[in-house]
Every structure is written in structure tokens, then in C-alpha cells.
């Protein structure tokens, strides 16, 4: 086996153990020592491939978002009925999280417990998925007869405001909970409710 292949195998092994670590612990509570112990990896091998926890953490985030973005692209449907497209979009998200529980935990740990000193790097990593969400929203809004005077960009801005509000609310909630508590389903249901309110308003439907 060549040195290059050995290096790839070692990095892959470290990645697998690290994914499990960052799925079960926030960045602050995760540990390189625990990763080495769980994976039977020497400190020398670890620091030969990764200079510090930040680099390893960002690799795991990139892996999570790359897999999730590819999953969306492979499963998104196009329909004349925009309601069916929205339903499908949420089903894709649910299915991905159901099939990839470890990546779901990493996703929500990143969303709600993002380490501030890595915020710029994480924003660059999440850009592809953010763009996919933006393009999907624009596509749907172009199919909807929106109220006169409103622009699609203004509605997307409102969606961003609501998401930031939810992120802040659930970030505070997670801080009060013990490590490992899963509030992702509550978050998803709350987000869906707010999207429904934005689309249909607060008035009773006829």
C-alpha cells in the first residue's frame, strides 16, 4: 500500500470518529482526546493530518453540508403545483434527517451552537445549501400570485428574519438543556408553522 493510500485511510478513519464526536457534542464540549481514544488514534497521527480541532470540525461541517446539498439536488422535484413542491421540499429534509441521524445532529449543532470564531468559515461552507434554499424560494414565489406591491426579495428577507429569530430562540433553549437533548423536531415544526403564516397570513381562510 502506498503512503498516499495509507494517509487517505487514516484521514477517513479520523473523519468517521470525529463525525460521531461532533454529532454528540457541541464544539465547546467536543474533545480531540476523546476522538483519539474512541478511534484508537495516536496524537501523533491526529496532528499529522489535522493541525487542530478547528480544522477537523470544519471538515466535518463541510462533509455534512456537501452530503445534504447533494441529497437535495438528487431528490428535488419540479411540479406545476407549487404546494406540492413545498411539501416535497420538506419531505426531502425529513427523509435526509431520518436516514442520516448523525448528520442531523451535526447540522443542528452547527445551526444553533455555531462557534463564533469559526462563523466566517462556516458561512462559506454552508453557502451552497443557502443558495439552493434561496433559489428554491425564488422559484416558488414566481409561481405564487403575491400581493401587489410586494417583491419576492422582500418576502425572502422576511423568511430570513424569521429564521434568525428562531435560531436565536432555540439557541437559548439549547443552552438551558443538557448536552444531547434533541429539539430538532420542535424546531422543524415551528419553522413550518411560520412559513405557513407568511404564505397565508393570519386571517381565516375562506
Image (spheres, rainbow, N blue to C red):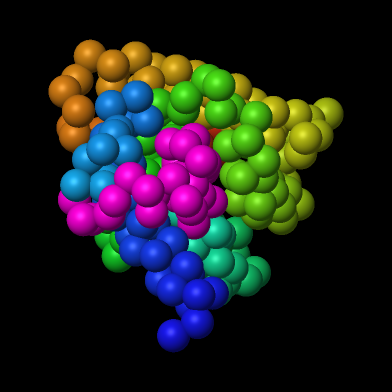
- Indicate left or right for 180 with 70 as reference: left
Residue 163 within the segment the image draws in magenta: no
Residue found 48% across the figure and 70% down from its top: 8
Q: How many numbered dots are placed on residues in this image? A: 0
Residue found 30% across the figure and 65% down from its top: 99
| Residue closest to the eye, 43 or 114 | 43
Q: Position of residue 179 (x, y in %)?
A: 20, 28
With respect to residue 74, does 102 lie above or below? above
Q: Position of residue 67 (x, y in %)?
A: 49, 62
- Indicate left or right for 146 with 118 as reference: right
| Residue closest to the eye, 125 or 69 | 125
| Residue closest to the eye, 178 or 27 | 27
Residue found 75% across the figure and 29% down from its top: 154
Residue 162 visible? The answer is no
Residue found 49% across the figure and 47% down from its top: 50
- Indicate left or right for 193 with 174 as reference: right
Q: Main secondary structure of the magenta part?
A: helix
Give residue 34's quadrant in the image: top left
Q: Which region of the structure is painted magenta?
A: 38-63
Give residue 166's quadrant in the image: top left
With respect to residue 35, does 156 lie above or below? above
With respect to residue 116, does 142 lie above or below? below
Residue 53 within the segment the image draws in magenta: yes
Residue 139 visible? The answer is yes
Amino acid at each position: 500500500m502506498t503512503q498516499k493510500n495509507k494517509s487517505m485511510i487514516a484521514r477517513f478513519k479520523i473523519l468517521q470518529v470525529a463525525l460521531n464526536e461532533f454529532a454528540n457534542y457541541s464544539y465547546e464540549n467536543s474533545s480531540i482526546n476523546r476522538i483519539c481514544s474512541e478511534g484508537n488514534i495516536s496524537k501523533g497521527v491526529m496532528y499529522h493530518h489535522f493541525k487542530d480541532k478547528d480544522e477537523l470540525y470544519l471538515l466535518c461541517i463541510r462533509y455534512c453540508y456537501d452530503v445534504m446539498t447533494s441529497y437535495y439536488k438528487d431528490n428535488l422535484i419540479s411540479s406545476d403545483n407549487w404546494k406540492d413542491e413545498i411539501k416535497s421540499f420538506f419531505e426531502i429534509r425529513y427523509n435526509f434527517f431520518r436516514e442520516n441521524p448523525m448528520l442531523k445532529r451535526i447540522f443542528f449543532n452547527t445551526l444553533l451552537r455555531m462557534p463564533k470564531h469559526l462563523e466566517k468559515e462556516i458561512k462559506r461552507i454552508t453557502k451552497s445549501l443557502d443558495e439552493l434554499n434561496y433559489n428554491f424560494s425564488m422559484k416558488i414565489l414566481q409561481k405564487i400570485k403575491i400581493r401587489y406591491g410586494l417583491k419576492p426579495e422582500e418576502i425572502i428577507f422576511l423568511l430570513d428574519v424569521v429564521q434568525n429569530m428562531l435560531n436565536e430562540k432555540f439557541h437559548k433553549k439549547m443552552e438551558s438543556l443538557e448536552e444531547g437533548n434533541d429539539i430538532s423536531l420542535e424546531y422543524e415544526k415551528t419553522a413550518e408553522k411560520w412559513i405557513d403564516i407568511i404564505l397565508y397570513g393570519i386571517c381565516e381562510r375562506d
